[in-house]
Image (cartoon, rainbow, N blue to C red):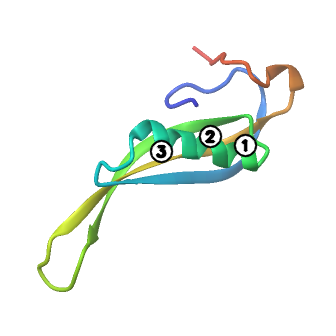
Amino acid sequence: MFADQRPTCSYDEIALVSARRRSGRVSMEKAADALRNAARSLGGDAIIAVRLGSTQVATGAGTTPVTTTADLSGTVVRFRDRGCRGARTAAP
């Protein structure tokens, strides 16, 4: 997964993926694993532009408590050069 850097190999963007972590019940590592699994199921080689955000969800009507969730998202890519698959190189 690449958050700020981009792979040095050329690639095609396949899809946007996201995972939601609710109330600390799921670790961020499990959310990242969910992104990786989604990328694999789409035939992707890597996830770029990985971002962490948050969403507030009302748990009832009116002024009831709000639950905050952490969202992890990114863009699934497929490398054009088969030799780049599995490589962890990034542009400086």
Q: Nearer the viewer, residue 1 or 33?
A: 33
What's the CA distance linking mark 3 and mark 2? 9 Å
Q: Secondary structure at mark 1?
A: helix
- Residue type at mark 3: give it: Ala
Residue drawn at point x = 65 percent, y = 49 percent: 38
Residue 49 in picture, x, y percent from top left: 54, 38
Contact flag, marks 3 and 1 (Cβ < 8 Å): no
Q: Earlier in the sequence, mark 3 or mark 1?
A: 3
Considering only vertical position in the picture, is 67 above or below 34?
below
What's the CA distance linking mark 1 and mark 2? 6 Å
Q: Residue furthest left?
A: 63
Structural crowding at the residue carrying mark 1, measured as other residues with C-alpha within 10 Å and reported as few (<14), some (14–19) or many (≥20): some
- Residue type at mark 2: give it: Arg
Residue 54 in picture, x, y percent from top left: 33, 53
Q: Residue beneath label 2, please?
A: 36
Structural crowding at the residue carrying mark 3, measured as other residues with C-alpha within 10 Å and reported as few (<14), some (14–19) or many (≥20): many
Residue drawn at point x = 62 percent, y = 45 percent: 75
Residue drawn at point x = 30 percent, y = 48 percent: 24
What's the CA distance linking mark 3 and mark 1? 14 Å
Q: Residue beneath label 1, please?
A: 40
Pick the quarter of the image with the N terminus.
Answer: top right
- Residue type at mark 1: give it: Arg
Contact flag, marks 1 and 2 (Cβ < 8 Å): yes
Pick the quarter of the image with the C terminus.
Answer: top right
Residue 16 in picture, x, y percent from top left: 62, 52
Q: Residue beneath label 3, please?
A: 31
Q: Secondary structure at mark 2?
A: helix
Q: Nearer the viewer, residue 58 or 14?
A: 58
Classify residue 58 as left or right of residue 38.
left
